[in-house]
Amino acid sequence: MNKDQVQGKAQQLKGKFKEAFSKLTDNDLMLYEGKRDQFVGKVVELQGIAKEEAEKQIIEEMQVRSQI
């Protein structure tokens, strides 16, 4: 998955959040994105992998967990 695909998935997720939680503001979503970036950074640090790979693994894990 390349950077554009990851960004596309992130935009889809952002849209789904807006749908589900219509009272969220753009500032709320920016806060979420900041926390997400921190989480990706922590995965990169702990796993010793590239940012793109960390984002891919996080997306895959979220998809698995959302099916439960």
Image (tube, rainbow, N blue to C red):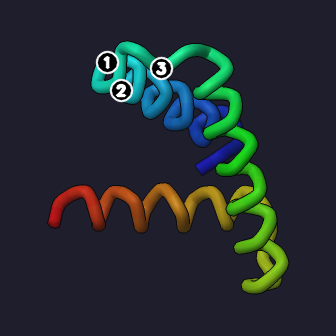
* SS category of the residue bearing label 1: helix
Residue at label 1?
Answer: 19
Q: Is residue 23 depicted above or below 46 in this figure?
A: above
Question: How many angstroms separate mark 2 from mark 1 (CA)?
Answer: 5 Å
User: Residue 52: image x %, image y %?
Assistant: 72, 57
* SS category of the residue bearing label 2: helix
Q: Amino acid at mark 1?
A: Glu
Other-residue count near label 3 (Cα within 10 Å), few / some / many at <14 / 14–19 / ≥20: few
- Badge 2 vs badge 1, beta-carbon distance below 8 Å: yes
Q: Amino acid at mark 3?
A: Leu
Q: Is residue 12 depicted above or below 65 in this figure?
A: above
Q: Amino acid at mark 2?
A: Lys
User: Residue 27: image x %, image y %?
Assistant: 67, 20
- Badge 3 vs badge 1, beta-carbon distance below 8 Å: no
Question: How many angstroms separate mark 3 from mark 2 (CA)?
Answer: 11 Å
For the point 60% across and 27% down, the residue is: 29
Residue at label 2?
Answer: 16
* SS category of the residue bearing label 3: loop
